[in-house]
Amino acid sequence: MNLYNIKNIYFDIVIIGGGTAGVSLAASLLIRNSNFNICIIEPQSIHYYQPAWTLIGNGILNSVNNIRPMYSVITPDISWIKSEVLELLPKSNKILLQNGKYVNYKYLVVCPGLILAWEKIEGLIETLGKNGVTSNYSYNLADYTWKLVKKINKGTVIFTQPEMPIKCAGAPQKVIYLSGDFWQKKHILSKININYYLNNNTLFGVKDFVPILMEYIKKYNVKLIFNANLIKVDGKKKTALFKLIDKEGNFISNEYKSFNILHVVPPQISPDFIKNSLLANKKGWCDVDPVTLQHLSFQNIFGLGDVCGILNAKTAAAARKQIFVVAENLFDLIKRKSILKIYDGYGSCPLPVERGKVILSEFGYNDKLLPTFPINPKKPSKLAWLLKTKFLPWFYWHGMLKGNDFLSTN
């Protein structure tokens, strides 16, 4: 849709974000009512299957097979405005685009994801993709991660995890397990010093999974350094600077560490147009009801996915459940019915702890285990590996993005 000659444009429903949540929700709403006039606002031309990036970074999946042109995944009857959002004006039901045009809406769903703040780590941007510095949080760097993992025969490898919240909180350690397994099978693990610096005081947020994960930490001889934040990288000198704090957040010391490989997970923040709007909570995230996902101040607005300021895991699996809740609740709101669908905080983090085995962690609010499949969630599973590497990628492209509610309604 070309907006250059349009001063104002109106839609029944506007969805900000053409990622997993936005594309899937639009399709799901059209299935409920094909007469809805729906628009997605998304500046990017490429759609990514992000759960594959860790697997790409360890040579298990191919990078080329996990991207699509944006136009090919958006349902044809959905309008797509290829633009960034500059400002939200919820009191007047308007959105100001970067090109100066306004979009008017009756209902709004906000799901732009979050922002990877690489710039918050001094020296990082200048050395990403070279000098042994990489990150599976970038599609463009996942292949470089695999190149580094294959090439190293000895030395020090550092993995980092920033302050929460981040998307897929298990991803920083997935690369550790898969790399450790590869080096072990290559018979060089004893020559590699693996360090995991976490800006946290626990290995994994859901305590039921910590014992089994600790077994793999020991198996791969990983040294855990808790409450440590990466603040500076010197790629040419191959050194990383960490700020160490105690459990109360008090400064202890700075620590320099040399590396051969540095895998960085960047700090992650809310988009400016959310953070600076009336939709934001005190921390800058979209202020929605954690159960209905309806905005707490504006009843015609819902939040969805990573941008929401709720205590759940920021994963594609969480979005899958949220999409059904928002679609049903928005549909009922339009029909002037009571909002009844409940989000239980579901999130899933399939943790590949070795090639061929996955711990299928599924959980909700208050760390309640919420298994979808008849698989012991606390034991590594071959079936869960097939689910992670075969079925879920296929279902993403051919089911979820098409509005299919399978796996979302239970």
Image (tube, rainbow, N blue to C red):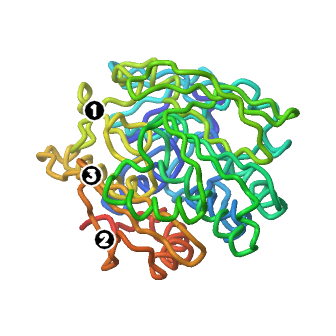
Mark-to-mark CA distance, 2 and 1 = 28 Å
The residue where tag 2 is placed is 372
The residue at the point 48 percent across, 62 percent down is 401
Q: Identify the image quadrant of the N terminus.
A: top right
For this orientation, the residue located farthest to the right is: 236
- The location of residue 285, given as percent across then percent down, is 40, 29
Foreground pick, 257 / 124: 257
Q: Amino acid at mark 2?
A: Thr
Task: Identify which residue is drawn at 29% across, 68% down.
Answer: 371
What is the secondary structure assignment of the residue under circle 3?
helix
Residue that badge 3 annotates? 367
Residue closer to the observer: 370 or 103:
370
Percent coordinates x, y for residue 95 in the rendering: 47, 26
**In the rendered image, the vertical position of residue 186 relative to residue 20, given as above or below:** below
Q: CA distance from mark 3 to mark 2?
A: 15 Å
Residue 308: quarter of image: top left
Whether tag 3 and tag 2 are in contact, CB under 8 A, the answer is: no
Position above or below: 267 against 203 = above
Pinpoint residue 205: horizontal percent, then vertical percent.
37, 48
In the picture of the structure, the residue carrying the numbered disc 1 is: 295
Earlier along the polypeptide chain: callout 3 or callout 2?
A: 3
Left or right relative to 321: residue 39: right
